[in-house]
Image (cartoon, rainbow, N blue to C red):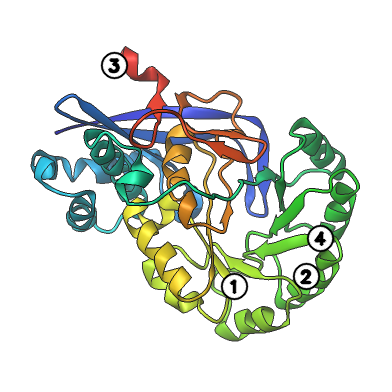
Amino acid sequence: MKMTLHRIELPLAHPFTIARGSIRSQQSLVVQLEHDDSVGWGEVTENTYYGHTVESIAQSLGRVTELLPAYGQESPDELWQRSLEAMDGNLFALSALDIAAHDLHARRNDVPLYQDWGLTWDSVPDSSYTIGIDTIEKMIEKLAEQPDWSIYKIKLGTKNDQEIVQSLRQHSDAVFRVDANCGWTVDETIENAAALAQLNVEFIEQPLPADASEADKRAVFEQSALPIVADESCLRESDVSACRGLFHGINVKLCKCGGLTPALRMLRQAREFCMKTMVGCMIESSIGISAAAQLLPLLDYADLDGAVLLREDPAIGVQVCRGKVSLPDRTGTGAQWMGHHRN
């Protein structure tokens, strides 16, 4: 078993702004796992909000090198557990390794990854397209550049959030979802929810700060006119049960929870709790998006537009076209880094 790390920069088509700040490009680390004649691909992007740089992620991945020779006899789940201990709990680094391990396992079994898990692709949800915070005029332009998506996710957390949604609604009849990225208070959430419900918004993602009190979360859960989906409040497996009775659904992101292995468990547990399930993404290439897309059969909602937001995607894999997710006719996640031939 051989692991190779590739650092890549992902320039965006537009600056991407949320309530916490703005970026023009994203730093990403691609993990390449090779065993015999098969190659598995994983990816994770750095995130300074959670304290993870490409350098720190690569350093953590270096700690598992001695575990890899035995991987041929292990399942991805077993490798995940042993790597968690070796990486001192660095879930961002672990997610990239875990994605590559699952991809490699399915390729060696000569099946798409979702089939390797026993899932079927009978009916899967559409993905949303994200409109980042900007001037209202610019947000309208962004919507016009990506017409005919069935769902748009609108980033909020400004002083004129209701006006933003009202203005965008004049230009589209599509489903709207909003994401405040921890930018609202309890009163703002309840007030905004009532107004946004009149604009056919489907749900609100993470309105309160992740460290909001249980009383505040419960007040929003009980009084909001719209369902509330946890993102920053649901990072890892232990958070799912903590969100029960405080959120109507959870948004799982592979980098935050540690990869596909825990994501599968989180989604299944949420369904047992009768909560809505969603998988989101960072701004990342088709390697990361193709991995997350394998979870679609377990989802109610999806936000897998990360590669669509790029100026140029350095990888190929699943296609997300106006919300419809199409799988390539390849095994594993179906992803391939375009720089592979140079290494």
Q: Amino acid at mark 1?
A: His
Q: Is residue 129 above or below residue 244?
A: above
Question: What residue sits right under mark 2 in the picture?
Answer: 193
Marks 1 and 4, how far apart at CA: 18 Å
Which corner quadrant of the image does residue 100 belong to? top left
Q: In the rendered image, which residue does mark 1 sit on?
A: 248
**Which residue appears at 23% of the width and 54% of the height?**
77
Q: Which mark is residue 200?
A: 4
Find residue 250 and report its horizontal and vertical position in percent.
53, 65
Instruction: Count neighbours of disc 2 (C-alpha within 10 A) and say few if under 14, some if 14 to 19, many if 20 or more.
Output: many
Q: Earlier in the sequence, mark 4 or mark 2?
A: 2
- Of labels 2 and 3, earlier in sequence is 2
According to the image, label 3 marks what residue? 343
Report, in whole angstroms, how far the alpha carbon at label 4 lies from the one at label 3.
49 Å
Closer to the eye: label 4 or 2:
4
C-alpha span from label 2 to label 3: 51 Å
In the structure shown, which secondary structural element does the residue marked by tag 2 occupy? helix
The answer to whether the residue labelled 2 contacts the one labelled 3, judged by CB atoms less than 8 Å apart, is no
**For the residue marked with disc 2, what is the amino acid?**
Ala
Can you see residue 100?
yes
> Mark 4 or mark 3, which is nearer to you?
4
Q: Is residue 187 left or right of residue 53?
A: right
- Which of pointers 2 and 3 indicates the residue nearer the eye? 2
Expressed as whole percent of the image width and height from the top left, the position of residue 145 reads: 77, 31
Q: Residue at x 45, y 25 (%)?
A: 315
Image quarter of residue 85: bottom left
